[in-house]
Image (cartoon, rainbow, N blue to C red):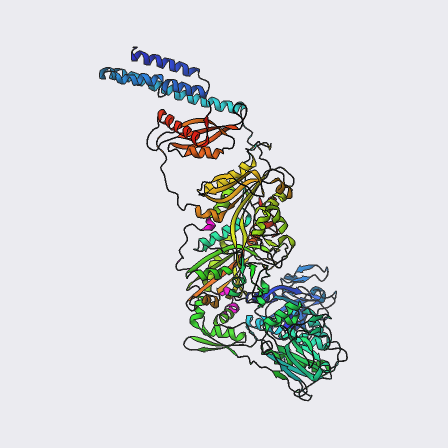
Amino acid sequence: MTSPTVSVSEIEAAALRDLAAIQTPEQVESWRLLYMGRKGRLTTVLRSLQALPIDERRRLGAHANAAKDRVQAAYKEASSRLADSIVARVIEDEQFDVTLPGPPLPRGRLHPITQMLREVVGVFSSMGFQVAEGPEIEWDYYNFEALRIPADHPARDMWDTLWIDYERDGRRQMLLRTHTSPNQIRIMETSQPPVRVVVPGKCYRFEATDPTHEWMMTQVEGLAVDDGISLADLKGTLAAFARRIFGQDRQVAFRCDYFPFVEPGMELRIDCFLCRGEGCRTCGRSGWIEILGAGMVHPEIISNAGYDPDRYTGFAFGMGIERIAMLRHGIDDIRHFYANDLRFLRQF
Amino acid sequence: MRIPLRWLSEYVDLTVPIDELASRLTIAGVEVGEVISTGGDWDGVTVAQVVDVSPHPNADRLVLATIDRGNGENQTVVCGAPNVATGQKIAFAPEGTLLKDGHTGKPAVLKRALIRGVESAGMICSEKELGISEEHDGILVLPPETPIGLPLASVLGETIFDLDITPNRPDLLSVLGVAREVAAVTSSRARDPSIEYEQAGKPIKGRARIEIRDPTLCPRYVAALVENVTIAESPAWMQESLVAAGMRPINNVVDITNYVMLEMGQPLHAFDFAKLRGGQIIVRRAKPDETLTLIDGSERQLTEEMLVIADAESPIAVAGVMGGADSEVGRETSTILLESANFNGPSIRRTRHALKVETDASRRFEKGLSSGLPPIAAQRAAKLLVEICGGRAAEGLIDVSPRKAKEGRITLTQERLQRVLGIDLPAAQVRQVLSSLGFGCRWVPPDRFVVRVPHWRTDIAIPDDVIEEVARILGYDEFPTTQLRGEIPASQPQPRYKLRERVRDALAASGMQEIITYSLTDLETLRTVLPVENLTATPPLHIANPMSRDHEYARTTLRASLLKTLAVNSHGATDRVALFEVGRIYLPRSDDLPEEIEMACGVISGDSVDRWGRTVDAAPRFYEAKAHVEHALTDLRLAAFYETSVDAAYLPGRTAAINVDDRRVGTVGQVHPKVAAAFRLDDDVAMFELDLDALFPLVPEISHYRPAPVYPSLEQDLAIIVDVTVPAGLVLGLIRESNLVRSASIFDIYTGDQVSKGKKSLAVSISFQSEKKTLEDRDVAKERTRIVERLRREIGAELRS
């Protein structure tokens, strides 16, 4: 058996000699495996020292470790030299044209109504409102009667209705819901105060389409009922909502409006963010933009739900998501949403 | 409702600028949809009086005019008009007003100016500057009785508020009603028009008879009689008012009934008394076979549902909707029986729906008018008939009111006011607002108001209605703003809508574009994508009053919507389009609302391209569609298995049922070429459908942590030969059942010369790993033998040599 001392020196010399000739990163790696890998030549020799008697091990060890350090240093130096040479070569003649495209990755997006709806629902979620849902095809009872809009009530004209071809007791009773408000009744029927929900969903109207009218719409209904909820809470909640969607510096104003299921009833307006209240085409030169309808839940509805109307009060609101998305994105025609032209959809 | 401001100003002083008034009314719930100006844009121009004229120190042809604007401060301006004189009522424009330049005729904002060394802020206007005429030689001089301080628009020209009146306020379908609102928002008082008139004729009682046979549908009927009227044109002022309010003048009698309706909100009808058989009015339901020719010339079949006004023999008018042609007032009419009645709102609404006639009368009656109104309106109209048509009024009225309306009284507590509005209001303020609206309001210590509701406010029934009155007049913006306090209701652990949104996210993330399409479709389209049996078993719900043939049925599948949208977006090009929709389908149930099922549907067509836009040879689209399904299911932490399936819309042999936990949750496949052709799509379109309502109960609520394996894995390949009919999924399933197999996947499939006919070679890459120890080669060899043996036994697989 050759002396480990001699072997170490020989291996060191061979390693350094080989290293000096190396040109590529691949060669460096096979060199590393050959000499310094787990079964490499240098590693093996160094490991064989462990078999020697303690005196000899001590004498040869220092020499061997020094040799190992030198080889390692040379390895580091060679790696670095090689990296420099790669950089030099790339700069010299292997540069990429960074303006060329990468391979196309499949691209998908959510419909703008989905995006807007999520944002709106998200704002209310952060205020403790939970999401509930209800049927799109509804009974006249929930859509109208329970909301204090009996048959032959003049307020029915506020909601032109698509009816299902189905009669009970000689009367059409099933319809495509004209608003998400039936869910106020449905929710109160099945829960006890405190109530705090938002109900997103599609609604339908018997309506000819034009740039601002569409027969299918997406609405979000809100309802909060508890002991001690007042008009002040309604105002605060909706003002916070409007500012989070349309900007913290928005002016928010309320005006009286009529919905049979609320009392008092109101409409929320924000100052026009295009003209800042000066008056322009978007706001119909009024300086104000109508955002949603709202009001305090009518005490008769509270009482019909089996809640004590002297103790419990609440507020409700409803808004059209298309309108909010149109304002947000400057979309001039509501019919774009459900025409589903990719040239439109891909912009959101 | 068009409200001409000049007419309005007869009942209330207009003391604030027009825009401000429009804004205050709108805030109070009387929405001014549009301010129509027929005279010109005179915002800011008011009536003023010249109180002094003195010479200009530096110019002979100019004078200094001092004017009184009615605001307590006199102002001096430079004026060059030759006709200016002390005492004149004139139109004054302050600086900042937009006027027409007197010379160029172009609009210009009036600025403060130094005229020959004297500063002048404002101007006395000429007609040209106001845009009334080309007259610019002198200033416009108004009649001496014109009140100082009024907006010019209210005395000259016509400014009209076009109001959007909500259906709860029929009282606002009148100039007087709007005047009361104006009074309330400007802290002033409205003036009722005069109803006193000379009653020179014999008493009406005994000459005409009124009988109400259905007091529910007609709670009150008031009649007045005016003789010797001369039918002619109505006076110019009345015609102008009617035209400004949007009505066409007819003759003096008809114009008076319309004028009073517009003024007070009570529809009236004038009958030619000579044509009333028996001199009698009977208010009753129509008999089944009765017909009536209306004023518009159409003959109508009446039904027992309809209330009519009849004479002794037959109907002469459809109550509250339209009069009959026979009793109409004409040239030869000399005695008028004037009807001023109250009818049941819902009944009028049903009748006008059935007859398909909507009139100014029916629009008001159907909203429920005040039963206190008929005698007042009858007297007002009688007065005008006497004064304008030269008539002689019979003494008194006939007033049949079987149902006396009770005076509305409401008790409102401070506690309720505070609870609803969130603020304590001083009693005096509440009283002030309510009395400005014509309510009576008495404070009853220690804690409540007793409110008397004026007869015209048919919309006020409960304390909260009164609260709204207070709030809307003070303005909602004046009330405090707070955030919700109190307990937040408990939430559900994994709501469906959240899972649904995750599906949307996953499909979009995998490269599909979301669309949202109409829920209604037509039968033809449904037939294209659904087999006949399906449509028979679950016939789609039909819309009774569809807007178009295209949207007549509630969809029972999303397929057609997606394929249609795909066709629209393909434009004949071969670019890759991948669309999905998440939406509901509506499956009918007998005598109940339909079952609404949430579905996800996706379609893929066109080619993938590389970075040079060249078509790349990707997997068949069926497998692309499947990849999207897998992506979404994996996101929900669900594993699916697929088996060959058949469905009419899909190509047989390239269609799979998607199953999770032994439940069928959807379908994926290549669209049947005939279906594709029906939508003008090319042959290779892939589609998938997922029933989300079936899927969601299977989604695990929580995923439980398992540590990553610490022992190394060993990879081995396995090539076996099986019948071509054996699905690869089955082979992989068997291999994966081994405890030592971490994963297995196919990396090659071969059929051809190297294997016998009817066979295929499957190359499988298997990763072996144990959770207990480092596997040795011999452990793997043993397990591999066991797997091969099992494959041989169960599916007749041979090891490929």
Q: Residue at x 33, y 30 (%)?
A: B773
B75 or B477: which is nearer to us? B477
Taking the image as drawn, is residue B398 in sight? yes
Split into 4 quadrants, where in the image is the C terminus of chain A?
Answer: top right
Taking the view exactly as shown, the residue that stands out farthest to the right is B332
* Residue at the (41%, 31%) spot, across then down: B790
- Counting labels gives 0
Q: Position of residue B681 (x, y in %)?
A: 63, 41
Residue B521 in picture, x, y percent from top left: 61, 51
Q: Check if residue B106 falls in the magenta segment.
A: no
Q: Is the magenta stretch mostly helix, strand or loop?
A: loop
Closer to the camera, A67 or B330? Answer: B330
- Quarter of the picture holding the N terminus of chain A: top left
List the single residue furthest toward the top.
A1
Residue appearing at x 43%, y 33% in the figure:
B734
Which segment is the magenta one? Answer: B470-498
Identify the residue at horizontal 49%, vertical 34% (top origin): B727
Q: Nearer the viewer, residue B749 or B79?
A: B749
Q: Is residue B236 left or right of residue B283?
A: right
Image: B143 above or below B122: below
Would you say A129 lies left or right of B161 here? left
Q: Is residue B613 above or below residue A188?
A: above
Residue B191 figure quarter: bottom right
Q: Is residue B150 at all visible to an observer of this figure?
A: no
Q: Where is residue A179 in the image (x, y as percent from the top left)?
A: 54, 59
Asked if residue B488 is among those painted magenta in the image, a careful observer would answer: yes
Q: Find residue B629 and report its horizontal and vertical position in percent.
A: 50, 41
- Residue B343's image quarter? bottom right
